[in-house]
Image (cartoon, grey):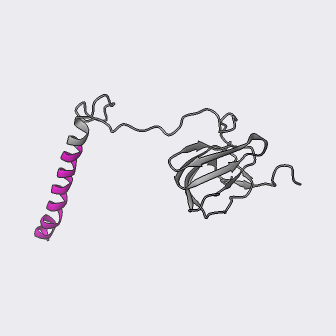
């Protein structure tokens, strides 16, 4: 039994040590980056996607009351497909993974988001996303809400009963 454990764990320990050494070499030479745990180990710099205290249409960021709940999802729309008019109870951060998304904000205009672009979606304002492209559109959406609240709520299109 001991021999079996030694044969099983020794390669694992060696692999972990090699990985740690590789990580040290990767991070140790990175200039002007804040420290992680030890002064000789540096963090990999982050590439900010967005930072704002307002949504895309100028609403102040608000958080729903109650016990917080974060939901992350990849939403896929086929060419010509739409989300349907809807609102959100809290902030939604989106990042377009593939394709193009046209979001209609009614009298606030249409915003076009392309691969690699991020958005801070409208909260209490009705909007409709549509893939007007020729390839599927995929977006990573992070809904910052509260337990008991849906990530989005369907609503009638503006100007219609």
Does any portion of residue 156 appear in the rendered image? yes
Above or below, 77 relative to 125: below
- Residue beneath the point at 18% across and 46% down: 21
Along the viewing direction, whichever of 78 and 57 lies nearer the viewer = 78
Q: State the residue lying farthest toward the front.
A: 134
Along the viewing direction, whichever of 38 and 45 lies nearer the viewer = 45
Q: State the residue lying farthest toward the left.
A: 3
Which image quarter holds the N terminus?
Answer: bottom left
- Residue beneath the point at 15% across and 61% down: 11
Above or below, 59 relative to 75: above
Q: Where are the magenta residues, as a range?
A: 1-23
- Residue beneath the point at 73% across and 45% down: 105
Asked if residue 18 lies in the magenta stretch, the reply is: yes
Which image quarter holds the C terminus?
Answer: bottom right
The answer to whether residue 111 is left or right of residue 94 is right
The answer to whether residue 36 is left or right of residue 137 is left
Q: State the residue lying farthest toward the right.
A: 161
Asked if residue 2 lies in the magenta stretch, the reply is: yes
Q: In which quarter of the image is residue 119?
A: top right
Does any portion of residue 67 appear in the rendered image? no
Q: In which quarter of the image is residue 55?
A: top right
The answer to whether residue 131 is left or right of residue 41 is right
Q: Where is residue 69 in the image (x, y as percent from the top left)?
A: 59, 49
**Magenta stretch prevailing secondary structure:** helix
Q: Where is residue 7 in the image (x, y as percent from the top left)?
A: 13, 67
């Amino acid at each position: 039994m001991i021999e079996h454990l030694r044969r099983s764990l020794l390669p694992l320990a060696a692999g972990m040590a090699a990985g740690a050494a590789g990580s040290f070499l990767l991070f140790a030479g990175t200039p002007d980056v804040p420290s992680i745990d030890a002064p000789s180990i540096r963090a990999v710099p982050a590439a900010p996607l967005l930072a704002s205290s307002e949504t895309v249409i100028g609403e102040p960021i608000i958080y729903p009351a109650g016990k917080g709940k974060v939901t992350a999802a990849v939403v896929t729309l086929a060419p010509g497909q739409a989300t349907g008019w809807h609102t959100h109870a809290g902030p939604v951060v989106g990042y377009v993974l593939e394709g193009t998304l046209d979001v209609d904000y009614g009298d606030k205009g249409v915003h076009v988001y392309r691969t690699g672009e991020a958005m801070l979606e409208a909260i209490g304002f009705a909007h409709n996303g549509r893939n007007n492209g020729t390839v599927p559109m995929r977006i990573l959406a992070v809904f910052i809400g509260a337990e008991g609240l849906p990530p989005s709520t369907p609503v009638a299109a503006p100007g219609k009963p």
